[in-house]
Image (cartoon, rainbow, N blue to C red):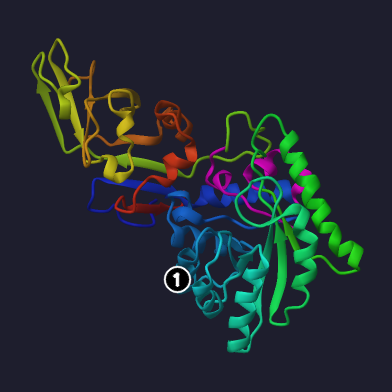
Amino acid sequence: MPDQAIPLRPTHVVVNLNQLAANLQAIRQKVAPARVMPVVKANAYGHGLVEVARHLASCGADMFGVAILDEAITLRQSGITQPILVLGGIQPHQVPAYLEYGVILTVGSLENFQAVESEAVKRGLQADVHIKVDTGMGRLGVQYDDAHSLLKASLSFQHVKVSGIFTHFANADAADLSHARLQLERFNRALAFYDESGLPRPMVHAANSGAILQLPEAYFDIVRPGIMLYGVYPDKDTQRSVGVRPALTWKSMPVNSKILPPHHPVSYGSTWQSDHSVRILTLPVGYADGYFRLLSNRGYVLARGREYPIVGRVCMDQLMVNLEGDPGETRDEVVLLGKQGKAEISADDLADLVGTIPYEILTNISARVPRVYVSE
């Protein structure tokens, strides 16, 4: 049964919290004894940052990963007490807020360390950081062949605690894992600093969803599941070694249903019309809600357990569906993403239609679409 009332808006997303918990448990079983850091960036991949984090915290999540400081602050202000790591880069002016909210910083340069140390000294406390090593992503972090120098320098900062060290894979979800293994080799060379110096390693992490599924030697101390936590696999070629299922369904109730005569165009640009009478269903959802305009005249929805095509251009706030073959009046619920009966539209299906990846389908669902949370 729903944990929340259906919102006033006819278009909404339903998030199954029990399925999220089941996905988390499946990942735990796969990676044990490594721990799990759920990645809840980008509004928990479209599922709702605060509600998802609260539920996963109640399920015993060890810590959380986010992309930007604002997400971490939102979690702190919402009562999340678990450690939170911001995986993105930092600007010096952000450091006071990191320390004020007790959030772990990602550092990848001497300048980062100096900025954190300076602010920590002012506040008379010790800052918590994870060092990022760039092993082949080319994005953030100290270059792998310079890592030993930075790790040695990090020992001189009295008010900065290096509680973790990590890297990020560029191709761990691919069928060919040669580059991922090269990155892992480079990361292990960086980690050798601790062994060679007779120092204990801090928390070590590297495995994203692809590596969790395909590269168990990268589990280390904790793993960082992102998209697979929400029940979607990172790539069609990725081994499905953990059984997860989607937790999100995007639904809408129609706001209009009528018969259009032959040759009556539909929507902007008059890009579609039928040579016979058709029943057109109007749904109050459009590209401002994150439903891609590229799905115009190519997407489809589920109604009464069947697929029906979207016709005409997707508008900012509405789209139209051709109920061809089902001319009766309908006010039934329509599914844009998810299952209805035995039929299903997956994030992969929509991604294929618009030439993108399932990540973008999920994270593109805008904040104006209400989220409803259920346990079933």
Q: Position of residue 36 (x, y in %)?
A: 66, 56
Q: What residue type is labelled 1?
A: Ser
Q: Which of 41 and 6 is in front in this view?
A: 41
Judged left or right of residue 222, residue 77 is left
Q: Is mark 1 on a helix, strand or loop?
A: loop
Q: Which of 49 and 61 is in front in this view?
A: 49
Q: Position of residue 134 (x, y in %)?
A: 68, 52
Q: Can residue 328 be seen in this view?
A: no
The extreme left residue here reads 261
Q: Where is residue 318 in the image (x, y as percent from the top left)?
A: 21, 38
**Total numbered labels placed on residues in the image:** 1
Badge 1 density bin: few <14, some 14–19, many ≥20, Cα 10 Å:
few
Q: In which quarter of the image is residue 185?
A: top right
Which residue does the image show at 23% across and 50% down from the upper left?
Answer: 9
Q: Is residue 224 magenta?
A: yes
Residue at the spot of label 1: 78
In this view, 261 is above or below 95? above
Q: In which quarter of the image is residue 337?
A: top left
Q: Which of 281 and 327 is in front in this view?
A: 281
Q: What stretch is highlighted in magenta?
A: 208-233
In this view, 77 is above or below 64? below
In this view, 366 is above or below 106? above
Q: Where is residue 217 in the image (x, y as percent from the top left)?
A: 79, 45
Q: Does the magenta stretch include residue 170?
A: no
Judged left or right of residue 163, residue 54 is left
Q: Quadrant of residue 143?
A: bottom right
Q: Can residue 352 be seen in this view?
A: yes
Q: Which of 224 and 333 is in front in this view?
A: 224
Judged left or right of residue 366, residue 349 is right
Judged left or right of residue 195, residue 236 is left
